[in-house]
Image (spheres, grey):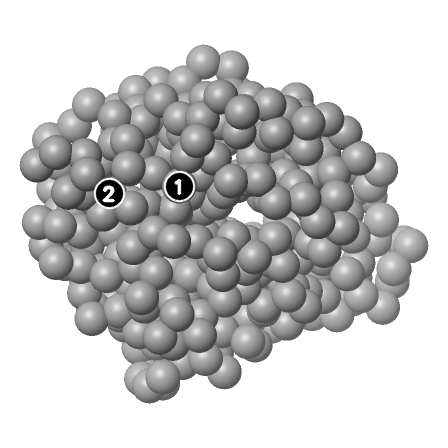
Amino acid sequence: MNSSAKPLVSIIIGMYKGEKYIKECINSVINQDYSNLEIILIDDGSPDQCGTIADDYAKMDSRIVVIHQTNSGVSASRNKGIDIARGDYICIIDQDDIVSSDYISYFYGLIAEYKADIALTPAADKFFGEIKEDVIDDKCEIWSSEKASIEMLYHKIIIAPWNKMISKKLLNNNKVRFNPDFFGGEGFAFSVEAYQYANKIVKGQKKVYHYRVGDPESGASKFRVASIESSINAQEYIREKFIKETPELLKAWNFSNWHTYCDCLNMMVGCKVTSDFPDLYNKLKEKCRKNALCALAAPVSLQQRLRGILFLISPYMAARVINHFRIRKFTNN
């Protein structure tokens, strides 16, 4: 099959204060072994050189489309990219991450072979510095929409919107977009909602997405009250979007909801702001302890079950222990 016969794939990269790593990210995309690409760079009113860098790349590669807009947030940026995308399939990549040269060809190969609406892998290569290319004997599985949703709600696969390829037709026909009210948990909500409408989802194993960790400048490491509220609200949104609420799906959602509260408590403790927001802290702590038993009854890893025991005994100490072993540290700056 020649390149012109292959479907167009749109890659969306939102940019905001990302000049430190954006060139590495863009280079990894333009060097894909799958060439029929549309690369959409969304400059979300970034105050650094992201916009200029994007314009320079667009002059060198006709596949690149640059959008400059006033700062609107990550959800609005990604929605803009989806709205203007001409591709048959959509991939979303974070500005500080890198993808393997076969990222697109790998996911499209899975979709074409299994006639799926979505292709994904459960994990990414976590790195800070050099990346490691994954060479495996790939074992693929076909999942239903409910199976994929349950696996994500149990945190058995990546909860972010990246590390997957999604049919543009699926997104448009079902009006699936990022909720612009969320800037914490927005990717989780988007992914689970998209799964609801998929007839077939194929799961591979190869780690073709390289997720940068340990960067203190990452927004994911900073404490914001609004981010905590958004993450909690996103869980409620996920439940509202269930097309069919089965007992198994609800059980998985209960675990995910509890896990989100624990993540929020971890952030408060890690940022040492528990005394600054006592009402929020006590609310999170109570929820984490009260619902900890859901982890013991869930089909999750031993590590997740131990997490449940720790939060049942002492939410504060559990958060301290978990933060001690985190690669990416929290900050309140």
CA distance separating discs 1 and 2? 16 Å
Do we see residue 313 in this rendering?
A: no
The x and y percentages for residue 11 are 42, 43
Element class at badge 1? strand
In this view of the protein, which residue sits in the foreground, 26 or 307?
26
Above or below, 158 against 34 in this view is below
The 10 Å Cα crowd at callout 1, few under 14, some 14 to 19, many 20 or more, is many
The x and y percentages for residue 59 are 54, 25
Which residue does the image show at 56% across and 34% down from the upper left?
A: 95
Q: Looking at the picture, which amino acid does disc 1 mark? A: Glu
Above or below, 17 against 180 in this view is above
Q: Looking at the picture, which amino acid does disc 2 mark? A: Phe
Q: Return the mark for residue 38.
A: 1
In the drawing, does residue 35 fall left or right of residue 77? left
Asked where in the image residue 244 lies, by quadrant, the reply is bottom left
The answer to whether the residue labelled 1 contacts the one labelled 2, judged by CB atoms less than 8 Å apart, is no
The 10 Å Cα crowd at callout 2, few under 14, some 14 to 19, many 20 or more, is many
Front disc: 1 or 2: 1
Do we see residue 73 in this rendering?
A: yes
In the drawing, does residue 135 fall left or right of residue 154? left
Which residue does the image show at 83% across and 53% down from the upper left?
A: 274
Image quadrant holding the C terminus, namely top right
The x and y percentages for residue 135 are 19, 23
Q: Earlier in the sequence, mark 1 or mark 2?
A: 1
Which residue does the image show at 52% across and 53% down from the upper left?
A: 81
In this view of the protein, which residue sits in the foreground, 253 or 49?
49
In the drawing, does residue 146 fall left or right of residue 71? left
Element class at badge 2? helix
Which residue does the image show at 28% across and 31% down from the upper left?
A: 35
Pointer 2 residue: 107
Asked where in the image residue 118 lies, by quadrant, the reply is bottom left
Q: Return the mark for residue 201.
A: none
